[in-house]
Image: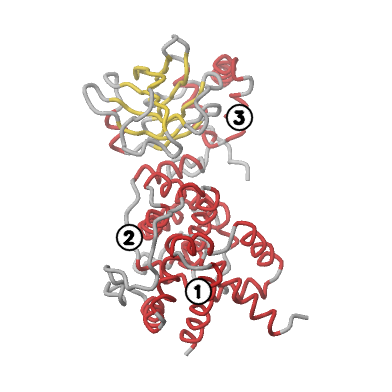
Amino acid sequence: MNTPADESADDLRYAEYVLGVLEADERAAVERELAASSAAAATEAQWRERLLPLAEQVAPQAPPERLWVRIRAALDFDSARSGRGLWDNLRLWHWLTLGSGALLAGACAALVFILVHRAAAPPIPFMAATMTEHNGQVGWTATMDIRQARMVVVPAAPQTVQPGRTPELWLVPAGGRPIAVGLISTHAPITLALSANLVARLGPSAHLAVSIEPPGGSPTGEPTGPVVAVGAIGAAPAGIVPATAQLLRTAPQRPA
Amino acid sequence: MNDTCTDPETLEQLLARTAMRDRAAFEQLYRQTSPRLFGLCVRMMRDQGEAEEVLQEAFITVWRRAETYNPTLASANTWLTTLVRNRIIDRLRQRRENTSTEAIDLERVPDEAHGPAVRAEASEDYVRLERCLGQLDVKYSRSVREAFFTGATYKELAMRAQVPLATLKSWIRRALMQLRTCLET
């Protein structure tokens, strides 16, 4: 049994936890107690209700729109309307990336397989870009689905970047300033939602580029790190378009 | 289908629908709460880029753990603020080198006096908390505010305020006990 003195000491510790003055190990200890005891969790919740209104003192500040784009990308959402699809199927993309060196061959084989087994679909506007590095090697490929306003960016092979840095994708309109598209991965396909503003600027006169940025992306809204790969935007290669369209159309339910 | 288009949904309802994997509800929750939460991230992280990262991580957690929200324990607003603040504090603990070492004088009222809420949308809870903070000894209330908005540990606060650790601890503990009493009346 806890004595009243113990309870009062715990009460104070939970208050200190909510306020945020405890050291990391003390915080971890409190978190274990909160997970183990509903009485502890209730006491801590009371302190939250008491102290957290102080946060209202801070003036609200709208986060940049790219943050929502990044959250959606990280959660692998597609457009909010069309719910679920093969596009969202992590397992498929994972499978497509298996054996990263053979990625494009594997992806093409998968698409050709589907193309052969399905009737060709009516045209849906797709565009693609192959971003090559300074040494001429393909760094990433991007396929853009204009109707659904999204883009999938796939590294051709695992890319090496400085530790603590992350690749960021930019749309560079002809003669215009780069526009941030989103953070991409060095080793996995990433699906990015495209704003109407971005979709309107996708076209054969524009390029995509990858720069190396601090975690979370460029702090200035313009590329701050070295640009490591660039590619022109063009029509998606023949064969990919109907096959990808078919992939999207015949999308099965996303596994739970 | 949601047919309550005349009634704006409460954060609790949005969070409940988010737990059911409703993306539209999640986006609405983000749109409604992110400016306030981002303001807090910027204030506490003191770095725009890090603030964005923390808020991104926090909302990813909201999507994945919305079903763990218990409306009998806390309001949705409190739940979200807690989630964000805990992320901020964990991050501050990992990045000791970024912690402010700027000296503070906790025994003096700062120039930008915080004062009770003037904003029209201030909640009753906030107004009451400000009233109770206003009744405390200045060094107690300043210690609590400084701790709340910097996420600093007792040790870091004592160093910045140039007072013994035991003194600072007693200030904050007395402040917390007095606040509890004041808020209960």
Query: Compared with residue A115, is residue A11 higher up or lower down, i.e. above or below?
Result: below
Label 1 resides on the chain identified as: B
Label 3 resides on the chain identified as: A
Label 2 or label 3, whichever comes before in sequence order: 2
Label 1 residue SS: helix
Mark drawn on residue A60: 2
Label 3 residue SS: helix
Residue denoted by label 1: B172
Query: Which percent across, then down, holds residue A148?
Result: 40, 35
Query: Compared with residue B21, is residue A202 higher up or lower down, i.e. above or below?
Result: above
Give whichever of A205, A56 is nearer the camera: A56
Mark drawn on residue A172: none
**Which amino acid type corresponds to the residue marked 1 in the rendered image?**
Ile
**Which amino acid type corresponds to the residue marked 2 in the rendered image?**
Pro
Q: By what rule are the colours in the image chosen?
A: secondary structure
Instruction: In the displayed orientation, state which residue is furthest to the left.
Output: A175
Q: CA distance from mark 2 to mark 3?
A: 39 Å
Q: Classify mark 3: residues with Cα within 10 Å, few (<14), some (14-19) or many (20+).
A: few
Query: Which percent across, then down, holds residue B8?
Result: 37, 67
Label 2 residue SS: loop
Residue denoted by label 3: A94
Q: Classify mark 2: residues with Cα within 10 Å, few (<14), some (14-19) or many (20+).
A: some
Query: Compared with residue A226, is residue B37 higher up or lower down, i.e. above or below?
Result: below
Query: Which percent across, then down, holds residue A101?
Result: 59, 15
Q: Classify mark 1: residues with Cα within 10 Å, few (<14), some (14-19) or many (20+).
A: many
